[in-house]
Structure formats: C-alpha cells, structure tokens
C-alpha cells in the first residue's frame, strides 16, 4: 500500500472513529486496525495523534473546497459529520483552530457575509456567530430540546428553523 492509499485509508477510518467516539477515546492502534494498516504506517505517513486529528479536520474541510452553496443545510450529512468531529475534538480539548490548516467553508461564509456587510469585522463576527449557533445545536441538541420543551419537534422542522436563524445572522435582517 502506497503513501497516498495509507493516508486516505487512515483519514477515513479516523474520521469515522472521531465522529463515533471522539479523538480522546480513539487510539492510533484502533485507527490503524479500522484502516487495515500497520500502526507504524500511521506514524510514518501522518504522525502523532495531534497530526492525525489535524489531517482529519483538513480532510473534512477540503470536502467544501469549491462545493459550498448558499443552500447548504445542517441536514447535509457532510456538514453533520464535520460538525460532529469538530465538536468532539473541541470537547476533548484539541486546539482545532491550530490543528486545522484550511478553512474553505469558513472563507465561503465570510464572502457570503461580506455581500451584505461593508465592515470586514462585522462580516467575520456574523460568520462566527452563525457557525457558533450551528455548533451549539450539534453539541447541545438533546439538552436544548429537553430544557425548552422541544422534544416533540420533528428533526426536519428543527433543522429548517436552525438554518433560517443561521442565515438571518449571516446575512443580516432582510
């Protein structure tokens, strides 16, 4: 198995494991076993656990490179997976903003926010607030549903409302 195949296999396996249980509860040995490679190949071709986390975050970010649309919904499985991995990494104490090197989705959101805002800082804040709302729901949905009495609200209805609120924050009042 060549370097590219190892990296691809390890990144896919680590993404699955991180989404399922988080990076803190996942060992390099488990990643290697799921990827079907020797543990030494993980260290040789990617590196330490932090480097594997960074590789996964960059891999997930690259899914949006050139494929980001204004119609993106939180129900998109790619977005849900990325948010799940980011949330688990954050909760496990990994410095996501340092380990991830590319942020194409955030850059696209910043460009979108800039279409309705002349101040770059205002566009950056709107982007951060919008993403924080989405991450907050990803992290705390069971708690938020129970605490506010939204347990009977259908997933589709909740997702639509979250999308509306995220767009309202991002694009400003219409």
Image (spheres, rainbow, N blue to C red):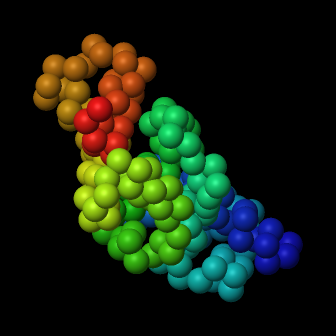
Q: Is residue 50 left or right of residue 31?
A: left
Rendered residue at 34%/43% (across/down): 171
Q: Residue 83, position in %: x, y?
A: 43, 49
- Residue 52 location, x and y as percent? 55, 73
- Could you tell me which residue is drawn at 21 percent across and 35 percent down? 143
From this viewpoint, is residue 49 visible?
no
Please identify the quadrant where the C terminus is shown. top left
Residue 93: image quadrant is bottom left
Residue at image location 73% in from the left, 65% down from the top:
8
Residue 46, compared with residue 155, is above or below; it is below
Q: Position of residue 28 (x, y in %)?
A: 56, 71
Q: Is residue 45 visible?
A: yes
Name of the residue lying farthest toward the front: 118
Q: Quadrant of the N terminus?
A: bottom right
Q: State which quadrant residue 120 falls in.
A: bottom left
Q: Nearer the viewer, residue 77 or 171?
A: 171
> Looking at the image, is 117 positioned above or below residue 169?
below
In this view of the protein, which residue sits in the foreground, 31 or 140?
A: 140
Query: Is 131 above or below relative to 161?
Result: below
Residue 59 sits in quarter: bottom right
Q: Nearer the viewer, residue 129 or 110?
A: 110
């Amino acid at each position: 198995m060549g370097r590219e195949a190892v990296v691809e296999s390890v990144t896919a396996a680590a993404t699955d494991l991180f989404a399922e249980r988080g990076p803190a509860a996942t060992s390099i040995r488990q990643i290697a076993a799921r990827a079907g490679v020797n543990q030494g190949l993980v260290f040789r071709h990617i590196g330490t656990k932090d480097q594997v986390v960074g590789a996964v975050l960059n891999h997930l970010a690259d899914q949006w490179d050139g494929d980001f649309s204004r119609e993106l919904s939180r129900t998109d499985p790619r977005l849900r997976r990325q948010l799940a991995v980011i949330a688990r990494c954050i909760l496990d104490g990994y410095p996501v903003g340092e380990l991830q090197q590319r942020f194409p989705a955030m850059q696209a959101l910043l460009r979108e926010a800039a279409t309705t805002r002349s101040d770059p800082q205002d566009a950056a804040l709107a982007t951060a607030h919008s993403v924080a709302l989405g991450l907050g729901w990803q992290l705390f949905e069971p708690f938020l549903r129970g605490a506010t009495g939204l347990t009977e609200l259908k997933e589709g209805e909740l997702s639509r409302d979250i999308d509306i609120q995220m767009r309202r924050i991002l694009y400003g009042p219409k």
